[in-house]
Image (spheres, helix red, strand yellow):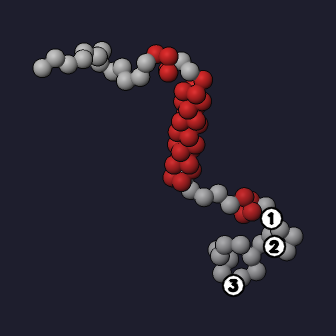
Amino acid sequence: MTGIVLPAGILLPESILHSELFAVLAAFVAINTVMYAALAVAKILPKLYPAGWIRRHNQRSETRSIHPDAPH
């Protein structure tokens, strides 16, 4: 049985690898990978609530509760 001998790892001709369409596809895959990684990291991190950092006008600076250790 005589088979065609191809160098290991070469699946596409070099002309396709240097084409503009392949470069666009490679850029799309790269951006997609970075976005997926960013979303995965964002899902791991705890949620941030910036509204909790700003004191509102109707919020008291001190608690008036009978329990002085109660949160504001």
Q: Position of residue 62 (x, y in %)?
A: 77, 72
Q: Position of residue 52 (x, y in %)?
A: 72, 63
The residue that mark 3 highlights is 66
The residue that mark 1 highlights is 55
Residue at far left of view: 1
Visible residue check, residue 64? yes
Report the quarter where the C terminus lies: bottom right
Pointers 1 and 2 in contact (C-beta within 8 Å): yes
Q: Residue 54 versus residue 71: which sits nearer the camera?
A: 54
Q: How many marks?
A: 3
Q: Is residue 59 above or below residue 31?
A: below
Residue at x-position 46% and y-position 16%: 14
* Amino acid found under the numbered disc labelled 1: Arg
Element carrying mark 1: loop
Dot 1 crowding, Cα within 10 Å, few <14, some 14–19, many 20+: few
Image quadrant where residue 60 sits: bottom right
Q: Indicate which disc residue 59 carries.
A: 2
Image-based side of 68 in relation to 15, left or right: right
Image quadrant where residue 6 sits: top left
Residue at x-position 51% and y-position 52%: 44
Q: Position of residue 7 (x, y in %)?
A: 30, 15
Element carrying mark 2: loop
* Amino acid found under the numbered disc labelled 3: Ile
Element carrying mark 3: loop
Image quadrant where residue 31 sits: top right
Residue at far front of view: 1
Q: Is residue 43 above or below residue 7?
A: below
* Amino acid found under the numbered disc labelled 2: Gln
